[in-house]
Amino acid sequence: MFSYYLDLALRSLRRNRVLTALMVLAIALGIGASMTTLTVLHVLSGDPLPGSSDTLFYPQIDPRDMDGYEPGKEPPRQVTWTDGQNLMRAKRGDRQALMTGGAVPVQPAQSGMEPFYGDARYTTADFFPMFKVPFLYGHGWSASDDESKARVVVITRTLNDKLFGGKDSTGQTLRMKDLAFQVIGVLDSWRPNPHFYDVYMGNYAAAEDVFVPLSTSRDAHFDHNGSTDCWGTGGGDQEHAETSPCVWLQFWVQLDSAAKVASYKEFLTHYSQEQKSLGRFERPPNVRLPDLMEWLDINKVVPGDVRLQTWLAFGFLLVCLVNTVGLMLAKFLRRAGELGVRRALGASKREVFSQLLVESGVIGLAGGIGGLVLAFTGLWLVRLQPSNYASLAHLDVKMLLITFLLAIGSTLLAGLLPAWRACQITPALQLKSQ
Amino acid sequence: MTVQIKPILSALRRHKAGTFLIAMQIALTLAIVCNALFIIQQRLAHLSEPTGLDEPNIFVVQNEWVGQATAEQVDAKMREDISVLRALPGVQDATPSNSYPLRGGGWDDGIKLKPEQLQDTSGAAIYFGDDHFIDTLGIKLVAGRNFRSEEITSMNVRDRLSPPVVIVTKALANKLFPSGDAVGKTIYLVGGPTTIIGVVELLQSQSVDRWAAGFAYRSVIVPKRLAISLGGWYIVRARPGQLDAAMRAAPKALFEHNPRRVINDEDGILSFSQVRSRAYERDRGMAILMGVICVVLLAITAAGIVGLTSFWVGQRRKQIGVRRALGATRQDILHYFMTENFLISCGGVVVGTLLAVAINLWLVTRFEMHRLSLVYVLAGVVILLLLGQGAVLAPAMRASRVPPVEATRSV
């Protein structure tokens, strides 16, 4: 029966090519636009560390003076050096890492290769196990390397390819800002999306080129990049960043159970009270402990424009569907005579109804294929854009399936009303007017 | 000539579904199109804001040092670089700075009128510059005086920001001293008091993103060279017509003078038109996208109207024939379909206006948009009514050509 309906549908669609093309085009445009924007949104709002993002937390405390104080206002989004060190030493989490971003001049040993600036992350030992960073060669550094300000460096696969031709470079020397560092590890390809651990470096930035112990970076006078927020007498001074009243470091902690989360929050409140009684903090304790995904929400990591575009695209799809409903209605009712004959020859309402739905399904399938082509084109155009998330815009299998489900589902939905209306035709009336 | 509306309405009552669908489509299209037009206008207005600079002749160099150096050494190297740049034949003037307008980030600070104030009176972008800063950028001094060369000092990043004198923009001066007598007044930067000695007409902030919108055009120029071991920016003004030559000559001369530096191939040297297009890339992209969506939406709606009206015309050939046989002119038939469409469109437009306002109110809460101005709704209404009339024209013409003899045919 289905193949007979399919045959009827194709015949009918062929009979009025312009109308058919118009319907398919409308569906394709709507689907193409929706899927392009939905894919971008899907890529941008993904979980950077699936499986472990719910055990990672970003403590916020308020070390500022009373200048501009409002109760209940969000605490700073970074920590000071002193607080970072205190929280590191307290070791209340299962793992913890203190970090900040920067840029260092890399001086390749090879002749003929000019020095260049590489993005750097200055952090502590737990960074690698905590964020499940994959290693191609070697390993990260240990807490004792942090302690001793060891001149060690972990580099990315890309930099390893560039400087050492992709060979195992552990044990080799890398010169940065006139100082020699020993390569102890090479990362495998790693690009968490978004760049969650430091949203001030660009929300969808690639991972840094080099990773150096935080203590070493201060010792080597490496420059800090990113946001520095000061109050009181702070002047954003890099040389005295350890003592100045400025927040410029990110602190992450891993807490494996709900009980630990609760007790860590308590610890943060106690810590704030303690610091207040010591005279370092002036404000009443104001602590927050968002987990990774909440932290991305707080920072509004997904660009507003992308969300706006998605809404717009779905509005567009809605108009396209209303349009298709209208055209299908016209098409089905125009065939009232033919349907009347079929009904008179014994086809039940139900059979006519499913025949017409098969026809709208065919339009949906064609529209879906067209929409997929348009979505691929749309994503290709997105990738040509200069924004730093552009290169991530790819259609995965899940989105591919959604495309077809959306196309066929919405066209069937659009076909319901016209098909139902066409079934209401009284066969006798149609036959009489013939 | 009058067109009877009553028979049209009673005819429409027999085509409820079709009428409703066209009206719906017009309503949705109107709602989306006028919000899109509004967004386009906002983005275009944003990206055509002036910076105050002599943009066609300016380029910027991002210079990064290689190797360890003290602040004094960095300052000395920076001064040498500036004299190298100023000596180039195509260059009119050059100044070192911590940033430049539209760069996307930089130093911003709170300004207070009294030291004991808890809340800042205004935020402001902080530009470091020497006595050539105003001339290099091509901005206009409207009150007071420029810095004297002996007022320019070096500032280490470890120092607090407390210059004895500053120049501010008119926008900031008006905010701080609405009576217009800013020159000679004392204001408080983060590091202490300072005196305003001059006011420049216009100087855009370092970022035009939303976070910096609160202090757009409110800038402070401090008479300092900021010595950062990482490096900094040189703003260069080429002689008229010599921008390309100067942009080629500058890095060459700098590397000849001192090769221990990095000037990124990709964005180490940017003409100001490149800076501008980078800063507003997103806004331009959004405006283009909205424009394309509007055009396609209108085209689809028009096609829908053509399709459905054609069907109605086909369905009513016999009635049209009867009307023609009874004395209706071709004009009457044409007007019938035009009026019919106009009535449907009016219904759609009324619903669409409400929908447009509703969507806008929702966007205001979610996307920091402004309230929709009624001009855009009106423009959308006119566009859609015209579109409807235009789309219905072809089927209506076809209807008017139905011969009266059709009345006698049975099929």
Image: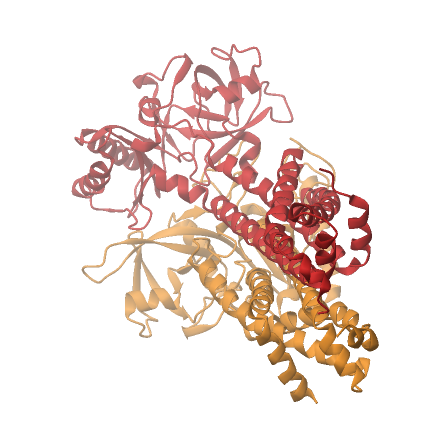
Chain colours: A orange, B red
Query: In this view of the protein, which residue sits in the foreground, A386 or B331?
Result: B331
The picture places residue B249, in percent across and down from the top left corner, at 19, 39
Residue A171 visible in the displayed image: yes
Q: Is A165 situated above or below B54?
A: below
Q: Residue at x 41, y 73 (%)?
A: A138
Q: Considering the image in quadrants, where does the N terminus of chain B appear? A: top right
The picture places residue B379, in percent across and down from the top left corner, at 62, 38
Residue A306 visible in the displayed image: no
Give the image quarter of residue A183.
bottom left
Q: Considering the image in quadrants, where does the C terminus of chain B appear? A: bottom right
Query: In this view of the protein, which residue sits in the foreground, B232 or B383?
Result: B383
Give the image quarter of residue A3.
bottom right
Count of number-bearing discs = 0
Query: In this view of the protein, which residue sits in the foreground, A431 or B360?
Result: A431
The picture places residue B382, in percent across and down from the top left corner, at 63, 39
Q: Is residue A188 left or right of residue A2?
A: left
Q: Residue at x 46, y 16 (%)?
A: B196
The picture places residue A267, in percent across and down from the top left corner, at 71, 54
Query: In this view of the protein, which residue sits in the foreground, B5 or B303?
Result: B5
Q: Residue at x 59, y 53 (%)?
A: B394
Q: Is B124 situated above or below A220?
A: above
Q: Is B83 situated above or below A309?
A: above
